[in-house]
Image (tube, rainbow, N blue to C red):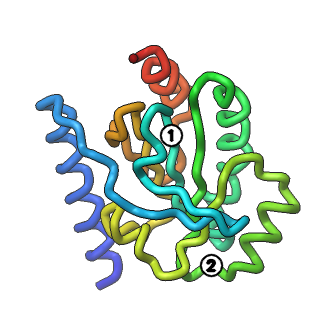
Amino acid sequence: MKRNLAIATIVAVVALFAGNYLWGASTPAPASTFVLLDGTRKTTADLKGKVTLVNFWATSCVTCVAEMPKLVSTFEKYKGQGYGTIGVAMAYDQPNYVVHFVQSRKIPFEVAIDNTGAVAKAWGDVRLTPTTYLVNKRGEIVKQYVGEPDFAELHRLIESLLRDT
């Protein structure tokens, strides 16, 4: 049953984004508030003007942990050019595990804990990790990845979006 739900979710997401790609439509990033580890808040509106990667992850997700150094490297490469990253820890992740993970690995980008699951729900009811969205300077989702991204392709897309005005 869970497998069928996961497959149906993936098919629906692929269909949505394939349709947007084929017809050139953009999907606005959903209105949501990220509560960062330091207690500050950032909203979707705050993303405008920057290219932003929003990564839903969990400390218990093997793929998430494996891709984290690549996310850090990507952030370090583009951060001075109008690029940002927000890591969103899933609601089921223990806050103390998230804090320890971020501190022990010296994660340089912003990390939020989605305690209530409201952010994951707003972003398409994210349940599979990692799920990553790339948002352009206008606050529109231009790409979604379920699983680890192809980082060479991701970097090309980031560079293209950074050039856009």
Residue shown at 88% from the left, 61% from the top: 104
* Mark linked to residue 52: 1
Q: Amino acid under label 1?
A: Thr
Is disc 2 placed on a helix, strand or loop? Answer: loop
Q: Quadrant of the N terminus?
A: bottom left
The CA span between labels 1 and 2 is 23 Å
The residue identified by callout 2 is 93
Q: Amino acid under label 2?
A: Asp
| Position of residue 73 measured from the top left corner of the image (x, y, whole percent) | 72, 35
| Position of residue 102 measured from the top left corner of the image (x, y, whole percent) | 78, 61
The correct choice, above or below, for 163 with respect to 64 in the image is above
Residue shown at 69% from the left, 50% from the top: 68
* Mark linked to residue 10: none
Residue shown at 50% from the left, 26% from the top: 158
Q: Crowding near pointer 2: few (<14 within 10 Å), some, many (20+)?
A: some
The correct choice, above or below, for 119 with respect to 116 in the image is above
| Position of residue 44 measured from the top left corner of the image (x, y, whole percent) | 42, 52
Q: Quadrant of the C terminus?
A: top left
Is disc 1 placed on a helix, strand or loop? Answer: strand
Q: Quadrant of the rendered structure where residue 8 is? A: bottom left
Towards the viewer: 114 or 68:
114
For marks 1 and 2, give the one nearer the viewer. Answer: 1
